[in-house]
Structures are given as structure tokens and as C-alpha cells.
Image (tube, coloured by chain):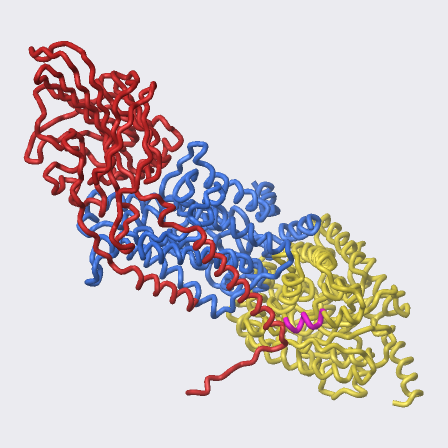
Chain colours: A red, B yellow, C blue
Amino acid sequence: MKLFFIAMGVAMILMVYTPRPSQAELYFGDALLLSEQPPSGHGGDHGKQGRRGSAQGHAEHRATAERTWYLNRHDLHTGAEARVLRSDGSQAAGVLTHGKDGWSFIVDTKPLDGSLDGVFTLSVIDRAVSDGILTVRAPKVNMINHSCGWGHTFKFDQERIKPKIDAALPLEIVAENLWDRNFHSKTMSGDRLVVQVLRYGKPAPNAAVSFTTGSGWTRTVAADEEGKASVQLIRDYYPETWSLFDARKQSTVLVTAVVEAPEKGAYLGQSYTRTRLVATLPWRYVPQRSEYTSSVYGLGIAALFAVASGAGIYAYRERRKRPCREVTFDERT
Amino acid sequence: MDKERRERLIRTTGVHLAMEATETLRQVVEEFPDNPRAMDYFYDLFRAEYCGGGAKKNGAMRIGMLCVQAPEELIRAAGAVPVRLCSGSHAFDQAGAEFMPAKACSLVKATLGMLSLRTAGGAERLDLVVNPTTCEQKKKAGELLEDFGYRVHHLEMPPAKDSEEARIYWQRSVKKFAAVLEETTGVRITKQRLAKAIRTTGMARSAYRRLHELAKWPRPLIRGKDVMLVTNAYFFDDLDRWTAAVTELADEIEQRRETNLPGAGKHAPRILFTGSPPIFPNLKLPLLIEQAGGVIVVDEVCSSSRLLHDQVAYDEQALYDMVPAVADRVLKPCTCPVFLSSQDRVRRLLDLAASFAVDGVVYQSFAGCMPYALEQRSVGQALVNANIPMLSVETDYGPDDQGQLSTRVEAFIESLRGKARKRA
Amino acid sequence: MNALRRFLNNGDINRFRLWFQLGAFGLLIYGGFLAMDIGNSLPTFSCVFVDSRAGACYLYPLQHQVNMPWSQFSGGRGIGLAVGLVTFFLFFVLFNKAWCGYACPLGTVQDWITKLRARLGIRYSLYANETFGRLKAIKYVLLALLILLPLGISNSLFGLPKLPRDLATSYCMICPGRTVLPLFTGDASQLAIDFSSRTMMALTGLGMAITGGFFAGAFVKKRFFCLFCPMSALQYAFSKAGLLRLTKQGAKCTRCGNCSRVCDVGIREIADDVTSRNIVQDDCMMCFKCVAACPESHCLAVTFLGMPVYEATAEGFMRRTKRRDNHG
């Protein structure tokens, strides 16, 4: 009993509040990508109550009426289209508007029922011709639409957490295995991130796929015959001291796929002789669990307490075998 | 006591005991019409025990107990046979008066008288006598028994039963008793043996309970004098034979449900008997009540319902759980007046009075029995509050007050008839 | 009707309970594989850390839901909290504290440990009255903390700085359910110390110490952890409204103590209280062993909406004693 309270007390003392440094600017060059943060960097509507240390503003497991995503650049061209592929496979119109936070992309998520529980695929297609080259930029993002309040009906339904392929996209990056059965994103540093590059739903072999972390580490690989490429995610988070370490710290990795082809044609009256397709998909990952947990210590402590309690009980019982227990008086009073 | 005098005493006591027993049995058997056929087993049993010089005892070790609080399950599990020694014989009462104070209660005097002579009533061969330290007279009896040459185990009892300390003290005391038993009989008390003892005694108690339940029937089905003979037989009879005989009796009674009890119509006042225990052959007061036309439907005495009502329950089939369980059975629900509080006894009486539709209560206290005499006030008050008439009787084993008692009992029963008629 | 009632009263509820617990354990721990989902407000330790669970222990969402600024209590999230509480209440009133005795997976695990101990012939421990009285207060402290700590994350309580976010599910972190129950699905990852922050280190350290104590305690003391369980405290707040009840007719009670003797939690009032009709105590888990051990007809009874479902009878008592002995 006493031990319990002492332990509780020690625990409380240990739980001192540790301030964390604010988020550093991410480095992703000039690629067009969708993000939860507006380009100005000081938080959108959802960012205000953002999770500490989180690169993203959305609370993943909470039902909201709509979600807003932002493009990091202002230079969208006329005719850019926004596409939403919902978890049940249906398509919805995305709304692109330009405001003080730049381009925002608003998605309706039907918060009241759980019918749209699962992964949404949001993408933008932006085309422009300059110097005889058609550049198609197709930033894409996967978003989980889930509330634990809806229950976990789809727990063992992998289809709901498998991003749908949008065959209308000129170039698309499809990542595998991003969520666990409870619809939590599960990627950790050290994991292998596997993506497939598709052109209009068909594998795009030999596409140049780069994986760039927030601090600028980049690795570029060529996609294989099936359009697949993968990389082992490096740890990209080194706080100065242990006390600043945050296990939920989300590092961002941006996957970029580029395909160039000598395709000719005309777009909005301008003819071109080459086509350059750029698709992006940002994803996030947290520090590897094994880096900050220890089963040895855990089992050690449990074993210590089990043995100590067991020994205590045994000793107590042995002592009780003596015929009588003496009554003691407090002589100090 | 010189040898000649002792032999004379043994002889005369034996004759008086047989006379007494014969007379009681005559009244029990012959003064009431149409006794249940299954009662013959018990009539014969008592005839053989008291008038025929005692039944043949088998070879098992015999362990005598002076009060209900010695856990008989342990005795059986240790391979011995428990014998309840409390005697109801006036002849033994007189033998006991030779060395006991005149004001001691008849039951203690008779029991000690019997044990001092070692002739009958189960005292012939005892390997150990267990003496729970209940009332002061029983407590002091222990030392006398040692003087008589018996091996006595004083089973120490707490003076209260509600506190945790009392319970732990008692459990410890019973655990020691278990060790003494093992040492006496040379048989280890194992969990299997104890489980069997709990089951067989439990079945005996269940059989008794069935008989008891039948008395709730709106018309009286069996007389108290017969029930008391049945429960008295439990003192010394073979357990399995007793259970079988009681089951047979209950079966017969159950079949009789549709017919009235001969000689006692449905207006017969229903009596709850409490206080000092009526033990064969001293069925004086119960017989007077039923001769006057009342029917004892239920009792709360340690020779009958208190002896047989409560059951043992244990959680784990292991001695560490079962031994305290059998210890608890004789302490926690016990309504013996030696304990600090009379509340449990009062509650028990009120419940019995209500569930057996009792018209009146007869409270017997033996002259010299302080605990019962002292509790009479609180019990009487509770019964008055519940609007139940009570007759208090102070008596002993002697026949002298027969006439005076019969007048009082008849008047009480008569006064209840109106109430009984209203009820029916 | 009478024949049915007699059949039920003669039954052995302990045997029924043994199988029911096994079924409930399988359902709550593995039900997810059958795509079962009973919701997130279960009044029992259907631990959220078990991936294949069929529903979630209410304490987890409760800690999450109260973790919001005062201003939001009147908004949508406040409604979420209210809906959760009402759902919990509806689940709870149906079976009252029988959730503990019949459904709780952690309780079932403790009962299995008890069976193991009994088989080894090692005697159980009992608390002295006084100790029991002191220990049972702990669950109320834990309940208060598990509501106050999350509140203190989103709000500044008593002028203190806001608490670290790692305290969000502080109770879960020290609950042995989190460490023990996932083991049944082969997941031992919870048996670890999390060094990611001081808070997590303290919580998981405490959690592992409690896990060690849990095994040692449950081995010698029947239903060891239940005395400290904040779910039990939360349930007791609503227990008087329960449809399923344990009732007692004090007049029939001889205070023989059989009920208290077999009580896994060690409740004395069940034997000694002869005035209360509704006899459910805060530590009671409504296993109804007491009813099975009561030899007095109609003294203890299980009622649902006032209808007796299972009653103590002299006949039933004897049948159980006989049957038990035959089964060893």
C-alpha cells in the first residue's frame, strides 16, 4: 500500500513538463505537393489544435465535417483538376479554391455515419506547356477518414485501408501497407517503404523514383518492371538530448516519380514534343519503437516485483506459523 | 466413594434409568394415536439403547462431545465415531448430585453422573472427550472428567462470535483440535476424508431439513415429541442408518399430507420450543404440551434444530479451506446463549415463528442454567413486540413439578386455541 | 414455471460461470477475428491493446474523451462524451457488476491463476478486515486520477501548468490488462519500458511493476486486482440502478458465513448485514458463488427486474455439495 503510493509519487515527480522546440521548415525543393499545412507555414484551420511535434495538422482519428489540404505552390495553371477517390471506391469532386493560404483542397467526409470509413485518395492534375514540353504535375495524398466512435467494423477488411488506384491519373504513386488494422498509420523509421508507379493505372517501369526526407536526404532509384521501387526509411530525427525526444515525432518522406517521354501532342492550343510527368506522394513516419522501448527492463521490473512480492508473502506465511503474534504498544505516547 | 456404595449406585441408577426410559417411551408411543410407521425404527432404537442394556458398539474409536460446538466432521474424517454425551436422565442427574452443587443444571449433573458411572448412554468406552468451553458449568465439567480418568480435550471457544478476532481464535482452536484427533486415532485427516464427512453429515442434515420443512404445512403432520426422538437419536446412532430412517420417515409424512394428524385438528396451537434442550428420557415439557393438545411444529434447541440445521460450504477442496469451514459452521450461526449477543437467536426465533405460522412459544430453562435464564428477557421482549405469546418454564429433570407444570401448560395451550382458530 | 425455477436453483452456477467466462474471454479477446464489434463503451476490461478484441473497455475512450478544453464540453465533443457515458450506462445496467464476475477477461485470467494455485495445494491469503477497508479506497483514487489527469492535459487545473500529453491514457499504462491480455494473442510488445519520455518511462515502469505484483498477488489472493480496479469504482456509481441484482432477506439469514467464506473478493457484509435488501457492495463482482453456497432457502437471490432468476435453496445447496464431491 505504502509502496504503491510512493511509486505513484515518484511517477508524478518524473512527469515534469518538458517544452519542445517548434517545427523546423521542411525541405522538399520545388516539387508540387499536397500538405496539411498551408504554404505560409503558420497553421490552417486544423493546425491550431495540432498535435505537438506533428508535421500534420489533422487529428487522424476524429470525425470532422470536412478536411482541408493545401498545395505548397501558388503556380497552378488554368484547367487544373482536383480528384477525390473515396474509401468505398466512389468518386467525388474536389474543390480547389485560392485564398490567403494559397490553394486549398476541401474534402467532404460525411462525419455522422461511418460509411466512408477508410482511405481517401486526393490528387490534383496540373498541366502546362512551355518550351515545347508538356509538364504534368500530379501531387497526391492518402488520407484516412476514421473515427474510433464509428467502431472498427472494417478492422479485418484490408480493402478499406488499401488506397484505390485512380486510372485517370497520368502518373500515380501507390504506397503499400501504410496503416494497421486499427487504421493507425504504422510506418516507422527503419521500415521499408514500397511504392508502385502507375501510368493511367498501368505499371510505369523505369520511372525515376526519389525518396526525400524533411531534412533533405534523398535517394533516387529506378522503378522495376512492375513499376515498383522501395527504400528503407532512415531515421531523420535527432533531438539534442534524450529529454527532448518525442516518440510521436513525425518525419516526412516525399516520394517523387518522374517519367519523361517523347510524346507529341497539343494542349490548350499549344503543341509540344516532349512530355514530363511528375507525381508526388508525401508520407510520414515515426521513430522505430524498438529504439526507445526495452522488454528486458520491462520484464526485469515485472520479475523483480513478482519475486519480491512472492518472497514477502512466503516470509509472512512462515512467520505466521509461530504460535502467537505479539501485540505491540506504541511507547512514545 | 467406596466400591460397594458405587456398585449399589450403578445398580439402582441402571434400574431407574430403564424405568424412566420405559415410561417416556410409553407416553411417546402409546398416548398418541397413529404414530408414523417409520418412527418404529426410533422407538426400537431407544428401547434397545436404554432398556435393553445398550446396543452393540462397533470397533471404531468413540469420541464423546459435550456440546454441539465440537465439529463432528473432523471426528468422522479422523476415522472415529462422535457420540454426543449430554444426558436427559433423572437417574443420572441424581448420580451427579453426589458430587455436583445442588444448584447446577440438571443437564450437566446428569451428563457428569453418567460419565462418572460409565455404564450406559454411550459412556461405556470413550477414547477422548471433547469439551467445548461453552457455559461455566460445562467448562468446569472438563476438570471433573479428567479426575474420572477420561482423556479430555478442552476445545477453547471465544465468548463472542461476531468479531474477526473471535473467528480467527476459534479457527486456530479447531485446527489444534484436528491435530489432537489425528494423534488420538492415528488416522490422518485428508481432504478426501473430510470432504466425505462433510458430504455424509450434510446429507443427514438435509434429511432432517426435509422433515423440518414438512412441518411448515398448514396442518400439523408430525408431533414434536417424535421429531425430538429423531434428533436425539442422532446423538449416538450410526450416521447412514439414521439418515435412511429419517428419509423414510419424511417420505411417509409427505404422503400423509392430505390427512389430518389424528387427534390434532387443524386448530391445534402450533408451538415453537426454545431454551434448554429436552433430551431423552426428559421429554417432560414437550410431552405435556402435546398431551394438552398443542403441536410443537418447530424448535430452536441445541439437541435438535441447532444441532442439525446448519450446513458447511467450502470454496476449495483443501484442508486450509475446509477445516475453517467446519469450524465456522459451529460458531457463526450458533444461537447458544453463552455468546455475547442474543441478536442472532432473537432473529432466528422470529423467522421460525413467522415461517412456521407459530401461535406461541414455550421457553424452557433448566433450574441452574444462567445463560438461558438471562436471555429470557430479551427474547421475551422481542416476542412481545412481534405479538407472539410466550410461556416461560423453569424446570429440571425431576418429576415433582409435573402437576403444576401441566396446569400452566394446559392454560397456555387453551389461551392459544382462539388464535389458532383465527389463523386457520 | 416452478419446475424450471427448481431446475435453475438446483443448478451449479459455478460450473455455468466457468464456461460462460471462457466464452466471454474468447469473444472479447478474439471476437475481432469474426469481425465482431460491440462498441467502445464496454463496462469490462476488453482491452484496447488487444488487436483482435470484440469491443473496447470504456476506460480508454473515457480518458480520451475528457481530454479536452473546458470550452468544448458543451460542443460536439461534449456530446461524444455524453453518448459514451450513456452507452456505458446502458450496457452496465443490464448486467450490473456481473460484467466483472462473468465477462471481464482480466478477472477470468485471475480465476485461472486461482485454479492453478488451488491445484498446487497452496493456500489462499485473506486480508484482515481493517486492511481490506483501507485497500478498497485505492480504486476510487485511481478513478479520480484517470479523469483528472486527462483533464489536466487540455486544461490548467488548480493553476498548475498543463500536463504532458503522454498522460493521456495514464491508467491504461499502469493497468495489468494492457500487459497481460495482449499476451493471449501472442503480442508481448506491451511488456516493455518506454524510454521516449520521463512520463512514459514512469508510467510503463509502474505498469511493469504492477504486472509483476499482479501475478504474485493473483496467485495467493483470489481476484487480487479487482479490489483496486477503477472500473469497479465507476460501475458502483451506477450499481443501484442495475436491473440484475443480488438481494438478501435478512430474516432468513443465520449468519453462518458460508457466503462470505466462498466470496473471492472477501466481502463480509454479505454475511453480516441482515438489514439491506440490495446487498451488492462496491467490491462485489456478482459471481453469485455466495448464492450457491447459501443453505437457507430464499435468503440470497439473484433477481432481474425484480424477478428471481437464481435463488438459494436448501435442496440446491445439497445437490451441489453432492455433485461437487463426486467430481472431486
Residue C239 visible, this orientation: no
- Please say if B289 is above or below A119: below
- Nearest the eye: A48 or B9: A48
Q: Please state if C151 lies on the left or on the right of B71 as rendered.
A: left
Residue B157 visible, this orientation: yes
- Please say if A73 is above or below B264: above
**Residue B67 percent location from the top left of the image:** 71, 73
The residue located at (43%, 38%) in the rendering is: C52
- Nearest the eye: B409 or A55: A55
The main secondary structure of the magenta stretch is helix
Q: Is residue A109 magenta?
A: no
- Nearest the eye: A309 or C247: A309
Q: Please state if B424 lies on the left or on the right of B67 as rendered.
A: left
The residue located at (78%, 61%) in the rendering is: B32
**Residue B127 percent location from the top left of the image:** 82, 73
**Residue C261 percent location from the top left of the image:** 57, 61
* Quadrant in which residue A37 is drawn: top left
What span is colored magenta in the figure? B172-178
Q: Quadrant of the C terminus of chain B?
A: bottom right
**Residue A255 percent location from the top left of the image:** 25, 30
